[in-house]
Image: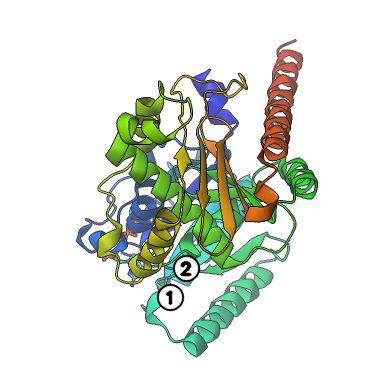
């Protein structure tokens, strides 16, 4: 089951020169390290296969050293064959000529063995650049890379560029876009989210990978960064509250879901690796504003997650939480399966019909189960055919 589970997750590889920021990205996105703590990280020195309890399968590779395409022992097929996306990190605050040369040779080597790979270039550490300089840098990197690839006869490689920093949400948003390309069920998921929003008066709905706070799908209304940020902050709030107060405090407010509360805190918080927002120089203030606004005005009701509750069961042991904010917006969170949570933004007036919303979300979850179940069935069928 573990293998099957693993295979159905999108696979990502993170590469780049030493000190470009790979380990920091990994720690901040998948281990909730605060960005300032990354200053003291030791540089990546070996292939880092991270065992993340997340929807996403993720590896970090380092230049130079690990990647020598001219070494005959270097097995490019094994390395690039199964990867969905290759994320290449470039330090925008440094001279990036060498990085661009590495990027070029990587794309050439990887594309040869796996033409389906998507290449994603993170122009990273842009927090230190002015707006104008950011745009110029992106233009320059984009132009140089595509020109060189065209000269090498590779015009139709899938290549995308993002401006990222670990000091704000840009790194999460970039990852969200990268991951979404790797999910074959994406159009179906978006469609389901559209139906859910239309029938429930929901303004915006995100499907989040809880551990990384990357969203893997959303309805087709435009995404504004603020709604993404507030939903991602909600995950932090829920995890913090459950881990601080655990069973007793939330239990007193929750209506019924007492038994599994401890599991909830443990399940979603065991990934928290030295989580401390307060030291984040740029992100902290914003997220604290959101937190206090939400908590002060909320009759917040947090539910539970059952560690063991399977993604297929559809039982009522899943996490559930509602935060009402001062500005008349309601945030509604519901666990979908062991990796994913649905978070919706809606008006308080709409939320008066909570029964309808609960019911529609329940239908959405069932449909989601079917989507992933079908995929599993399809794979089993293909495997059986292959074995015959
Ligand atoms: P690696 O060798 O590629 O794994 O690089 P590290 O993750 O060790 O990062 C090298 C340095 O870059 C560290 O001091 C980080 O704090 C810093 N860094 C990483 N990401 C960012 C970013 O987005 N902005 C800024 N200003 N510094 C960053």
In the image, is 251 to the left or to the right of 244? right
Marking on residue 331: none
Q: How far is mark 2 from mark 1, CA to CA?
A: 6 Å
Residue picked out by circle 2? 164
Residue 232 % position (x, y): 49, 54
Residue pictured at 61% horizontal, 18% vertical? 313
**For numbered disc 1, what is the local secondary structure?**
helix
- Disc 1 C-beta below 8 A from ligand 1: yes
Q: Marks 2 and 1: CB-CB under 8 Å?
A: yes
Residue 79 % position (x, y): 50, 41
Q: Residue furthest top?
A: 388
Alpha-carbon neighbours of circle 2 within 10 Å: few (<14), some, or many (≥20)? many
Closest to the observer, 57 or 319: 319
Render colour scheme: rainbow
Residue 115 seen in the figure: no
Residue 41 seen in the figure: yes
The C terminus is located in which quarter? top right
First of labels 2, 1 by sequence position: 1
Residue pictured at 25% horizontal, 63% vertical? 279
In the image, is 352 to the left or to the right of 267? right
Residue picked out by circle 1? 126
If the picture is divided into quarters, which one holds ligand 1?
bottom left
Residue 68 % position (x, y): 41, 53
**For numbered disc 2, what is the local secondary structure?**
loop
Residue pictured at 64% horizontal, 72% vertical? 146
- Disc 2 C-beta below 8 A from ligand 1: yes
Alpha-carbon neighbours of circle 1 within 10 Å: few (<14), some, or many (≥20)? many
Residue 74 % position (x, y): 44, 44
Residue pictured at 44% horizontal, 87% vertical? 130
């Amino acid at each position: 089951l573990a293998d099957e589970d693993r295979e159905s997750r999108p696979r990502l590889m993170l590469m780049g020169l030493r000190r470009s920021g790979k380990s920091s990205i990994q720690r901040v996105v998948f281990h909730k390290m605060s960005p300032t703590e990354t200053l003291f990280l030791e540089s990546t020195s070996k292939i880092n296969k991270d065992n993340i309890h997340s929807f996403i399968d993720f590896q970090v590779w380092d230049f130079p050293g690990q990647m020598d395409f001219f070494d005959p022992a270097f097995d490019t097929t094994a390395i690039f064959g199964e990867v969905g996306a290759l994320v290449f990190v470039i330090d925008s605050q440094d001279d990036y000529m060498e990085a661009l040369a590495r990027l070029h040779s990587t794309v050439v080597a990887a594309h040869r063995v796996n033409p389906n790979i998507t290449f994603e270039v993170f122009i990273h550490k842009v927090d230190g650049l002015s707006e104008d300089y950011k745009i110029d840098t992106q233009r320059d990197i984009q132009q140089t890379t595509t020109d060189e690839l065209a000269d090498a006869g590779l015009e139709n490689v899938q290549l995308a560029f993002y401006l990222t920093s670990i000091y704000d949400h840009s790194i999460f948003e970039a990852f969200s876009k990268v991951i979404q390309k790797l999910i074959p069920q994406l159009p179906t998921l978006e469609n389901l989210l559209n139906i859910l929003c239309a029938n429930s008066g929901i303004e915006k709905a995100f499907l989040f990978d809880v551990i990384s706070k990357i969203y893997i799908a959303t309805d087709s209304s435009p995404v504004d960064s603020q709604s993404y940020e507030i939903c991602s902050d909600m995950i932090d709030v829920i995890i913090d509250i459950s881990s601080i107060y655990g069973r007793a405090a939330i239990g007193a407010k929750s209506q019924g879901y007492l038994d599994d509360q401890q599991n909830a805190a443990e399940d979603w918080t065991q990934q928290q690796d030295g989580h401390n927002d307060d030291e984040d120089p740029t992100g902290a203030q914003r997220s604290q504003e959101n937190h206090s606004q939400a908590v002060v005005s909320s009759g917040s009701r947090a539910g539970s997650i059952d560690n063991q509750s399977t993604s297929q069961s559809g039982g009522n042991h899943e996490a559930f939480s509602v935060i009402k904010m001062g500005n008349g917006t309601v945030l509604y969170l519901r666990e979908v399966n062991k990796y994913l949570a649905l978070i919706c933004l809606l008006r308080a007036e709409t939320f008066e019909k909570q029964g309808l919303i609960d019911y529609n979300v329940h239908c959405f979850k069932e449909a989601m189960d079917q989507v992933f179940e079908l995929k599993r069935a399809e794979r089993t069928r293909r495997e059986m055919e292959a074995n015959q």
